[in-house]
Image: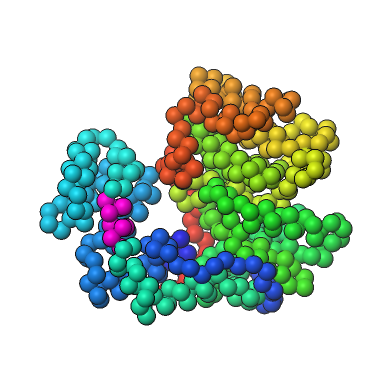
């Protein structure tokens, strides 16, 4: 994201972090180095290089790239959308300097903006498609063939090549758990910020003879997950003493902290609907890959800078047994643990849906009979929770033949646009001041 290129460097916090920086690791996995037009437009450094190239060669109207940049801001804005949309239309769609050739499209946009109501998020989509098509057809192809494109390729290669942990500046400890630490780290050569999970092999081997199998399962689950509501693993590597799992860094609060900010009051109806729907999509994605998460709780759910949820920590995740389609081990957090797991009975994805039901109960606040919780019954939320917490796994919501579809059809989600949500195109109703975290680690200089 653009923010990764604007963090300033900070001082180290502990001697342990400084020692970790000096260790040399062995690369196990990395991603490709292709640079698409989408990435150029969304990456601050690539965008700047592309913008300079277009300006020097006069390949497109000077308004095109600023239009796309402001459109990104419009799509991300939580408030003031009408004012911003009118400003964009006034700058880029009026008169001879319009970036849109189709006058009918411009007229429709103008008519929509004349109304005193929030404009739809896809208001500028026809114009965006026209501009994007023009860039793809000519300007971007010429850019790819030019010497100006080479720095983009080099930066992308540096971003994805990992040889050892010395290539990172380990800045601070984000959290510590039973298995190890999670550190915030900046990759020195490209400036990208990551969350690095560090596992001590010696400590793991003392706790379990199957630690290698456990770590390989966690790594496998992280690699296979490709969902907007699950934190991705970028790559992993190891030293003789440590295992490192490098993941996306989400610099905001957890759902647990967001609930604490409510000071015992219940989460609003739209907030509950938004969060539960995203978590249902994340769990469904794992289940489609024959995977169980087994540790869903507010502390394992991050809220990103745009107010969207991201499931993190696959330490308890596993694959279903290919022969039985079940698992038997007892793990996770007692409060969110399904009855069948507590009873040490074989289980499947039913345990995750039960945990989701318990997590929803956390959104109720300290007084379940307060006036603010009246919507639990009228909206169908109470019925949804009862369905997810059914003691019999086969009768539990989400556990039937149609899986997550039974949850999506529930009347509590009658107004939910699942397609838009799956594409991460639904604005967050969550209160920004309760999930945004002030940056406590500086930004690197360009």
Q: Which residue is at 54% across, 55% downward?
A: 250
**Which stretch did the figure color magenta?**
127-135
Specify the farthest residue to the left: 96
Residue 215 visible? The answer is yes
Specify the farthest residue to the bottom: 147
Q: Is residue 74 above or below residue 398?
A: below
- Place of residue 95 in the rendered image (x, y in percent of width and height, measured from the top left): 12, 54
Q: Which residue is at 45% across, 67% downward?
A: 35
Quarter-of-image position of residue 415: top left
In the image, is 296 to the left or to the right of 37?
A: right
In the image, is 235 to the left or to the right of 117?
A: right
- From the image, give the main secondary structure of the stretch colored magenta: helix
> Can you say which quadrant of the picture contains the C terminus?
bottom left
- Place of residue 196 in the rendered image (x, y in percent of width and height, measured from the top left): 63, 63
The magenta stretch spans residue 134: yes
Residue 91 visible? The answer is no
Which of the pair 340/197 is nearer the observer? 340
Q: Which residue is at 69% across, 74% downward?
A: 25
- Place of residue 191 in the rendered image (x, y in percent of width and height, measured from the top left): 50, 70
The magenta stretch spans residue 227: no
In the image, is 156 to the left or to the right of 318?
A: left
- Place of residue 201 in the rendered image (x, y in percent of width and height, measured from the top left): 79, 65
């Amino acid at each position: 994201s653009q923010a990764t290129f604007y963090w300033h460097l900070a001082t180290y916090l502990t001697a342990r972090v400084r020692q970790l920086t000096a260790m040399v690791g062995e690369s196990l996995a990395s991603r490709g180095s292709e640079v698409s037009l989408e990435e150029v437009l969304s990456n601050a450094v690539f965008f700047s290089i592309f913008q300079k190239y277009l300006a020097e060669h006069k390949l497109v109207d000077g308004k095109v790239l600023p239009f796309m940049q402001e459109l990104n801001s419009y799509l991300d804005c939580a408030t003031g959308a009408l004012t911003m949309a009118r400003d964009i239309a006034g700058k880029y769609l009026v008169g001879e300097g319009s970036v849109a050739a189709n006058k009918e499209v411009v007229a429709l946009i103008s008519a929509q903006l004349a109304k005193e109501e929030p404009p739809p998020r896809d208001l500028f989509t026809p114009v965006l498609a026209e501009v994007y098509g023009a860039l793809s057809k000519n300007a971007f192809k010429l850019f790819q063939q030019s010497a100006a494109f080479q720095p983009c390729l080099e930066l992308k290669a540096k971003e994805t090549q990992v040889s050892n942990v010395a290539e990172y500046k380990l800045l601070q400890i984000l959290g510590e758990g039973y298995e190890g630490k999670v550190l915030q780290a900046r990759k020195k050569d490209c400036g990208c910020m990551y969350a690095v999970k560090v596992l001590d092999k010696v400590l793991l081997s003392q706790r379990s003879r199957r630690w290698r199998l456990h770590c390989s399962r966690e790594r496998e689950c992280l690699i296979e997950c490709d969902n907007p509501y699950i934190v991705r693993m970028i790559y992993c590597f190891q030293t003789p003493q440590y295992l490192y799992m490098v993941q996306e860094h989400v610099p905001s609060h957890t759902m647990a902290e967001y609930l604490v900010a409510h000071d015992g009051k219940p989460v609003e109806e739209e907030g509950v609907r938004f969060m539960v729907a995203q978590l249902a999509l994340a769990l469904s994605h794992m289940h489609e890959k024959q995977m169980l998460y087994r540790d869903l709780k507010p502390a394992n759910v991050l809220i990103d800078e745009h107010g969207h949820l991201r499931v993190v920590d696959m330490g308890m995740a596993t694959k279903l047994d290919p022969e039985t389609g079940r698992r038997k081990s007892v793990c996770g957090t007692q409060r969110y643990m399904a009855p069948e797991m507590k009873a040490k009975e074989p289980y499947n994805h039913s345990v995750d849906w039960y945990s989701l039901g318990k997590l929803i109960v956390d959104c109720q606040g300290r007084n379940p009979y307060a006036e603010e919780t009246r919507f639990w019954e009228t909206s169908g939320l109470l019925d949804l929770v009862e369905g997810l917490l059914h003691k019999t796994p086969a009768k539990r919501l989400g556990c039937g033949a149609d899986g997550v579809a039974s949850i999506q059809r529930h009347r509590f989600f009658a107004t939910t646009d699942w397609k838009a949500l799956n594409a991460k195109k639904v604005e967050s109703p969550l209160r920004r001041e309760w999930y945004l975290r002030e940056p406590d680690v500086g930004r690197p200089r360009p």
